[in-house]
């Protein structure tokens, strides 16, 4: 896909504004574009509405209480599409500060690439929706997350900080198809969802064209993957001494658990 062919028509950010919402008046959610990098395809869901017929969308939904938006995006991606996934660090432009001590800025991060504000519940609640980029899981990770019926969802491990995209693709045998799990929806509507892996251009068309935020999530995600791949090929790979924000959070959580367990 040529970036220049879509950039001019991409949706634009709205003007920043002031707004205030008490806890009982807003809802946070997360959505995700799940890429199978080796085949340059992305997961697109579909459903049928009696008024408009068949429509297409990226998986998304409300995060659970106590769950961060990144983890919520991965879980919703699995529940609505049937594809296990993990958020993919990319060279995304953002304005978040680096964690202390601020020695350097990691070249890759898994920050959301769009946020949408939409009214819910007959315009009585404000919905804050964060969009992330993720990848399907390699075949050796899939078995680690298997659960029995009615067992809680298992979150995936973070993308390894020192793993290049070329090395990641090599973890799959030639022609590998990511596993699609049946019956992952948690309610009647989600149970009726269908999903498929389609090419990037086709996904953008199905999602409403270049002026659609969901289509632009796909565009930005694929361009970020291409940019990361180019950086790695030029020797600008992620330095091993700098972990991704996801790896740092995971290490901090493990350290805390060991401390509590040893006390």
Image (cartoon, helix red, strand yellow):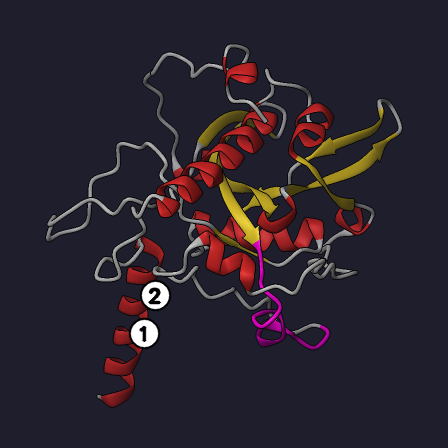
Label 1, label 2: how far apart the Cα atoms are: 6 Å
Query: Would residue 170 be seen by someone viewing this image from the given angle?
Result: yes
Q: Quadrant location of residue 216?
A: top right
Query: Would residue 10 be seen by someone viewing this image from the given angle?
Result: no
> Which label was assigned to residue 250?
2
User: Mark 1 packing: few (<14 Cα in 10 Å), some, or many (20+)?
Assistant: few
Location of residue 210 with respect to 175 vertically, above or below: above
Q: Where residue 11 sits in the image (x, y, percent)?
A: 52, 16
- Residue toward you, 72 or 167: 167
> Which label was assigned to residue 263?
none
Quadrant, the N terminus: top right
Find disc 1 in the rendering and name its residue: 254
Residue 261 located within the stretch drawn in magenta: no
- Specify the segment rendered in magenta: 136-149
- Residue toward you, 236 or 67: 236
Residue shown at 64%/33% (left/top)?
200
Location of residue 175 with respect to 102 vertically, above or below: below
Q: Do the residues labelled 1 and 2 touch (CB within 8 Å)?
A: yes
Location of residue 168 with respect to 43 vertically, above or below: below
Q: Residue furthest front?
A: 234
Q: Where residue 109 sits in the image (x, y, percent)?
A: 34, 45
User: Mark 2 packing: few (<14 Cα in 10 Å), some, or many (20+)?
Assistant: some
Regarding mark 2 in the picture, which secondary structure is present there? Answer: helix
- Residue toward you, 170 or 135: 170
Quadrant, the C terminus: bottom left
Residue 140 located within the stretch drawn in magenta: yes
Residue shown at 48%/51% (left/top)?
87
In the shown orientation, is residue 187 left or right of residue 226? right
């Amino acid at each position: 896909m040529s970036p220049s062919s879509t950039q001019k028509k991409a949706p634009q950010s709205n003007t920043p504004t002031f707004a205030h919402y008490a806890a009982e008046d807003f809802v946070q959610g997360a959505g995700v574009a799940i890429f199978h990098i080796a085949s340059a395809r992305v997961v697109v869901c579909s459903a049928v509405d009696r008024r408009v017929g068949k429509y297409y969308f990226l998986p998304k939904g409300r995060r659970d209480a106590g769950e961060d938006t990144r983890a919520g995006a991965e879980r919703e991606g699995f529940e609505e599409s049937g594809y296990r996934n993990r958020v993919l660090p990319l060279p995304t432009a953002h304005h978040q500060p680096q964690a202390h001590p601020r020695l350097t800025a990691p070249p890759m991060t898994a920050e959301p690439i769009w946020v949408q504000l939409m009214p819910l519940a007959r315009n009585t609640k404000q919905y804050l929706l964060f969009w992330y980029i993720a990848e399907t899981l390699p075949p050796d990770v899939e078995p680690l997350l298997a659960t029995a019926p009615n067992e809680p969802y298992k979150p995936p491990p973070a993308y390894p900080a020192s793993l290049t995209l070329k090395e990641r693709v090599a973890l799959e045998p030639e022609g590998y198809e990511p596993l699609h799990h049946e019956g992952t929806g948690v309610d009647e509507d989600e149970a009726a969802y269908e999903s498929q892996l389609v090419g990037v251009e086709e996904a953008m068309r199905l999602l409403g064209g270049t002026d659609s935020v969901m289509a632009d999530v796909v565009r930005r995600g694929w361009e970020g993957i291409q940019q990361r791949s180019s950086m790695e090929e030029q020797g600008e790979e992620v330095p091993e001494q700098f972990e991704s924000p996801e790896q740092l959070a995971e290490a901090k959580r493990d350290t805390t658990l060991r401390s509590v367990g040893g006390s």
